Image: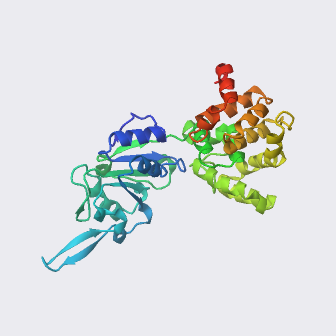
Amino acid sequence: MSNVINFGKTVTLKQAAQIILATPMNRYMLRSEPGCGKSSLHGYLCAALPEYLPVFIDVPNMDLGDIAMPVIDHEHKVTRYYPNSRFRLNEGKPILAMYDEYSKGAPPVMNMLHPSLEVYNPRIGDVMLDPASIIVMTGNLNSDGVGDNLKAHTRNRIITLHVSKPTADEWLEWAVDHDIEPVIMAWVQRFPHCMASYLDGDEGNPYIYNPKKVQTAFVSPRSLERASHIVRARGLLDQDSVIAALSGTIGEAAARDMQAFITYQDQLPTWESIMRSPTTATVPDSPGACAVMVFGAIAKLDKNNIGPFMDYVERMEPEWQAAFCINAAKSKTKQAVAFSSKKFADWVRNNEDML
């Protein structure tokens, strides 16, 4: 059996990163249902360890020659295995490698990569890795039914981390800092069950991945990011085209429900009118429109407009005031802007019971 670090429980992506950074000598396998952001963790780890060389290996698309190839050593009359340049072993630094979807790789490719999973004397082909090198693998859960398989001798060398699907609140905290369209964020905020997991037994959920059903598209953190690009380009498309593209990205049920939020966005008062007259500009009254307004404002926030928008948002229902202030305060890119405003700081002080 594999060494399960969390005794059957799940960890968030943030917790998984902390575990890897604290014990980089281990070989970790991150497993979750599709589209939960496992692969994106590579960028986060590389940013945290800039002295490492980033290496990303898309294992299912690799053949043996993409890993290492035999070359003839004429001087010693032997052959040697030289690793592919993508592993960067000739650059004299430790690597931070992600073997993406390792458990879907062809058996010969997995076998070729296997020696690099050793803690002591790891190698690829005949070339040793820098001892400080870090290797992280990803894969899906067996229950996902998408062809993941590991042999016992591999499982005994790695530590499996079951990564949970982010909740709506966790995803929104990420989305605010990653240029996701306000319509998408507003929809997730109003339909948080779109981030539920089939592992919770919610088989009637029309939005999520379900391995028992034939699905061409479903809602996941990955597909929501793709949907954001479509919504952003809606001005170049007719309504039927937007729905068709969204249906192929997040599924028809989610696409139809999201269409209402696109309509809200297009009917809201302009940002210019709010900045010009925050005390008289129209305030939306439907929950969906309020959600779009709040998340759109967070995306636009800067030191010059935080004051006028606080005058505007305080005319909204307390629920939406809190949604704006909480998400702005959580944002790594917006929190400094928010707390630079005396009006924002006063609101936080006066409404601590809502936070």
Viewer-side residue, 243 vs 197? 243
Q: Residue at x 65, y 27 (%)?
A: 345
- Residue 121 visible in the displayed image: yes
Q: How far across and how far down the image is residue 25, in percent?
A: 29, 45
Q: How far across and how far down the image is residue 81, in percent?
A: 24, 70
Residue furthest out toward the bottom? 74
Q: How far across and how far down the image is residue 308, in percent?
A: 76, 36
- Residue 264 visible in the displayed image: no
Q: Residue at x 43, y 62 (%)?
A: 60
Marker count (numbered): 0
Q: Quadrant of residue 281?
A: top right
In the displayed structure image, the side of residue 339 where residue 62 appears, left or right? left
Q: Which color scheme is applied?
A: rainbow
Q: Residue at x 47, y 39 (%)?
A: 14
Residue 73, compared with residue 6, is above or below; it is: below
Viewer-side residue, 222 vs 102? 222
In the displayed structure image, the side of residue 232 where residue 3 appears, left or right? left
In the displayed structure image, the side of residue 205 where residue 116 appears, left or right? left
Viewer-side residue, 190 vs 152? 190
Q: How far across and how far down the image is residue 272, in percent?
A: 80, 46
Q: Residue at x 42, y 42 (%)?
A: 17
Residue furthest out toward the left? 76
In the displayed structure image, the side of residue 94 where residue 146 appears, left or right? right
Quadrant in which the C terminus is drawn: top right
Viewer-side residue, 196 vs 132? 132
Quadrant in which the N terminus is drawn: top left
